[in-house]
Amino acid sequence: MLRLADIDLIYNAGRVDEVVALRNLSVTFERGQFVTVVGTNGAGKSSLIQTISGAARPTRGRIHLDDRDVTRLPDHRRAGWIARVFDDPRAGTAPELSIEDNLALAMARGRSRGLRFAVTARRRAVMREHVAGLGLGLENRLADRVGLLSAGQRQSLTMVMAALSAPSVLLLDEYLAALDPETTATVLALTTELVRELGATTVMITHNMDHALALGDRLLVMSRGRVIADYDGTEKSEMTVSGLIDRITGAGDALSDRSALIEQGARPRPRPGSARRRSHRTGSDWSGARGAIRSPDGSRR
Amino acid sequence: MTQILLDMLVTGLPLVPVFLGIYTVFRLRADFDLTVEGSFVLGGAVCALTLVHGWPSWLALLAGTAGAAAAGGVTALIHLLLRVPVLLAGLVMSIGLFSVNLHVLDTPTLSLGTVGTLFSGFGSLSGRQADLATSGVMAGVVAAVLVAFGLFLRTELGLALRATGVNARMARSQGVNDRRLTVLALVLANGLAGLGASLAVQYQGYADVNMGGGTFVAGVGAVLLGELFVRPSGSKLVRIVGCVLVGTLAYRLVLVTALRVGLPAGDLRGVTALTLLVAIAAERYLGALGGLTRMLARNARSATTPARQEAA
């Protein structure tokens, strides 16, 4: 079980450029739950992932993983339990290193690294077995540089790396965003299979409303650093894409272009309230794009 | 010609560990550590001092290594505690170490006189034979260092070190503590510089407070030269140590030849800088040429193979 209690994540607290990424966020993920998270840019989705992974330390609040308080542990000390797949295919692997070196790096996750050889014949056999499951022929290219692989191959490899040390939490941060539709389908199939196999608590951020509804057994909608809607499996199965989009825009947030494209014509009706708030925001905003996303109009308090 | 090659070996081999350390930070960690300009001298100074105090030559070698490694540790501490870039921490250290080194030596130049060194057994041999024997001993030490380093890179710790330089964020998400590895890399790199300096001091018979000047640039130049010939990459470990060995010897060959041709010693730094520039230029513009020659070679090979098959 993963429990976040009263989390604030505030950058540059008390300064004029203060940014509130998460505000009083409390959410509990049951063991083995597969949760999808949607929301506009700046809603706090990635901050949620950062906070769980330990890459960002919350300004306030506690994080418990099962019975451990992991709030103060940095990301590399949580890596044994929490695996993460980044949105950028290049971020999750080391391009200069061979496939087997990347896999070996993941195999040592959660253990202390010593002077044992990283790649041994026995470990190579394990790697081959795991990579062969991808059906990409990578098992015969273990010595190749990862930089030679395509984005989809690299993201598939990252998935395998994430699964190697049997994590109890799997974080997927918009990891399909850079892939073409066909590859997306392949990697997605791999994901659902791995999640089922691992039984790990999975948090998946997506801009694709179809994925958000079709995958997993719980759906969170985030806005301005808070969870504004939390649907369980049955509620989720009754939800439609346009209904979900209405829920997001109802919070006064503008959809990002990417989500708007994916919604395929189910254009939300402009609301007088949100339109007014948006124009107010651009009018008072002098701090650039970030300010435009996190409105300084005080309504979030 | 033979003499040029021997000069290259006896002056170049001690630099191989030094430049291996520079490779560790410059290529594996993708960072710049200028500490080496001072830690090289510190290693040599500690080695000379312990030798003068009657320590056995092997122990003095280790003392020099440890002294320089400690300097790298201080750089790492400055970097981590004051949160300044390694480049700045190393720059501060290289300046400060000058005074430290002067205190350690107590004189700008400390001569070893007649104390026993690794190479003092060869005094009775003729010049050329003594050089041969000297380079033999050096080659033994250097080979041990290169093999040990190559094996270290293959371990889990060595792999983590290589990964942090390529993609630190990914390494952290895989559970690698990159702060600890920064310390390790700097201690290791400067320790290697101290080892090389100790070898050089024992060979030349004195330690000088100015002997470290230009080490960093020379090392980077040698690494770039080596990369022209060997083309190492993150997972090709034999090529990594091979690149440092070839690059160092090629760099020394240039310098030794320049001396033999009759250039004054004062011009050597200029030659070093030129070597660096030529290596960079060659990397930029001859890369295509290298690819072309390789392609021609492959074509020639594939053209001859069917002919041979027909003949068979």
Image (cartoon, coloured by chain):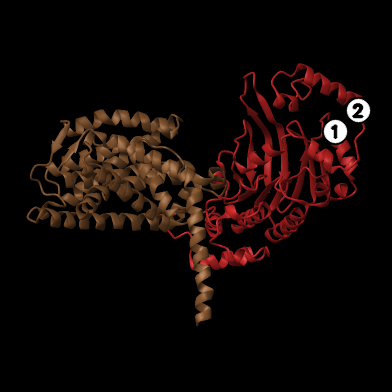
Chain colours: A red, B brown
When the figure is inspected, residue A283 is found, relative to residue B268, above or below; the finding is above
The residue located at (39%, 31%) in the rendering is B89
Mark number for residue A187?
Answer: none
Residue B187 visible in the shown view? no
Residue tagged 1: A249
Viewer-closest of B226 and B145: B226
**Which quarter of the rendering shows the C terminus of chain A?**
top right
Mark 2 and mark 1 residues within 8 Å of each other at the beta carbon:
yes
Q: Chain of mark 2?
A: A
Image coords of residue B139 (percent x, y): 25, 56
When the figure is inspected, residue A11 is found, relative to residue A91, above or below; the finding is above
Image coords of residue A166 (percent x, y): 62, 57
Q: Is residue A183 left or right of residue A232?
A: left
| Residue A287, image quadrant | top right
Q: What amino acid is found at the position of numbered circle 2 in the picture? A: Arg
Residue tagged 2: A271
How many callouts does the rendering have? Answer: 2
Disc 2 versus disc 1: distance between alpha carbons? 9 Å
Dot placed on the residue nearer the N-terminal end, 2 or 1: 1
| Label 1: element kind | helix
Q: Is residue A84 left or right of residue B307?
A: right
